[in-house]
Image (cartoon, rainbow, N blue to C red):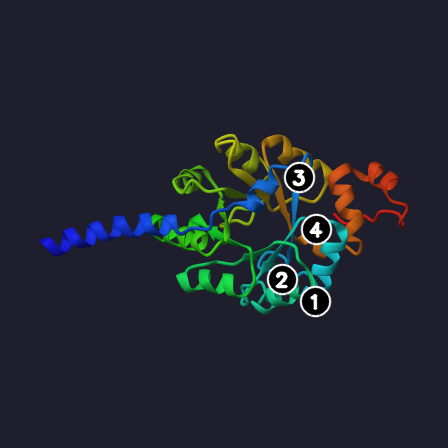
Amino acid sequence: MILDTIIEKKKTTLEEELMRMLPREQGKIAKQMKLYDSLFVIGEIKKASPSKGVIVEDFSAARFANAYDEAGINAISILTERNFFQGGLENIEIARSVSDLPILRKDFIMDAREVVQTKRIGANMMLLIVAMLDDATLREFYQLARFLDLECIVEVHNEKELERALQLQPEIIGINNRDLHTFAVSLETTKRLASRIPADISIVSESGIFTHEDMEYVRKAGADAVLIGESFMRCPDIRTHLQELKYGSCKACLLYTSPSPRDCS
C-alpha cells in the first residue's frame, strides 16, 4: 500500500533530519573523562538503597553537593527514585542551585517523558539501564536525550547487555559491578567487560569502589571514570577521602596538612 511506503520513507527522512538538528558539540563530559591521568570521579548523592537501607539519616542534597564541589570531585550523580532510594527530582534542583558541576540523573528511566523531564530539571546526564529496556526503546530514549543535549551513561552488567549497548555507538558506557539479582559486587565485571569496549568510548565503573586499590584495579582494567556513592556518603571528610582513593593514604597525608585521614571505607 502507498500509505505503508509513505510511512517507511517518513521514518527514514525524519531520523536523518533529527540527526542533523543535534547540537554540534556533543559529548563534552565523555571527552573530559578521557583527559584525566587519574580517574574522573562522579560522587553520588543518595539517602538510601535497597541493599543498605538508610545510608544518611541527616540527609541534605545541598550539603553533599557543596562538599563534592569543594573536595574537587568532577561530577555529581543524584538518585531520584523515591520508593527504594528515598530520592526526588527536587534534589537535582537543590544541587544545581549550589554547584556548577555536571549532574547525572540516576533513576530507572522507563518513559520518554522522563527524558524530557531530566533536561528540564537541570541535569546534564542521565542513566539508561540496558537490562530494563528493549532495543527499540533504548534507541528512542538515547536519541531523544542526544537531541536535548543530554549525555547518557548506558549501563550494562554483562556481555549480552554490552553487545546491545554498543549498537547505539554510545559515548559513555557504565559497567555496574553489582549483580541486579543477587546484589553481589565484583570489580571483575569491569575487567571482563572493559576489554570488549572500543577505545573511543568512555568507561565508567560503578559500585564496589571503596579503596585506592579498588580505584587502581578498575583503572588498569580500562575504566576512565568511577561512580562512588556509599563510600562518600558515609564519610565525614570527603576531601581527604577523595585523595586517599586517588593516591593512597600515605600520599594523601603528604598532600594535605588537614586533620589525619579517617578510615571511610
What is the spatial separation of the Cα atoms under label 2 and label 4, in whole angstroms? 13 Å
Q: Give the residue type at disc 2.
A: Ala
- Label 2 close to label 4 by CB (< 8 Å): no
Q: Give the residue type at disc 1.
A: Ser
What is the spatial separation of the Cα atoms under label 3 and label 1, in whole angstroms? 26 Å
Q: Secondary structure at mark 2?
A: strand
What is the spatial separation of the Cα atoms under label 1 and label 2, in whole angstroms? 12 Å
- Label 3 close to label 2 by CB (< 8 Å): no
What is the spatial separation of the Cα atoms under label 4 and label 1, in whole angstroms? 16 Å
Instruction: Specify which label sits upstream in the sequence, 1 or 2.
Output: 2
What is the spatial separation of the Cα atoms under label 4 and label 3, in whole angstroms? 16 Å
Residue at the location (70% across, 49% down)? 73
Q: Secondary structure at mark 3?
A: loop
Residue 4 at x, y percent in the picture? 14, 53
Instruction: Specify which label sits upstream in the sequence, 4 or 3.
Output: 3
In this image, 84 relative to 114: left or right? Answer: right
Residue 82 at x, y percent in the picture? 55, 67
Q: Secondary structure at mark 1?
A: loop
Which of labels 1 and 2 is toward the front?
Answer: 1
Label of residue 39 in the image:
3
Please give the residue where the numbered disc 1 appears in the rendered image. Answer: 60
Residue at the location (29% across, 52% down)? 14
Q: Residues within 10 Å of mark 4 (few under 14, many from 20)?
A: some
Q: Give the residue type at disc 3.
A: Leu
Residue at the location (64% across, 63% down)? 96
Q: Nearer the viewer, residue 159 or 185?
A: 159
Which of labels 4 and 1 is toward the front?
Answer: 1
Please give the residue where the numbered disc 4 appears in the rendered image. Answer: 231
Please give the residue where the numbered disc 2 appears in the rendered image. Answer: 48
Which of labels 3 and 1 is toward the front?
Answer: 3
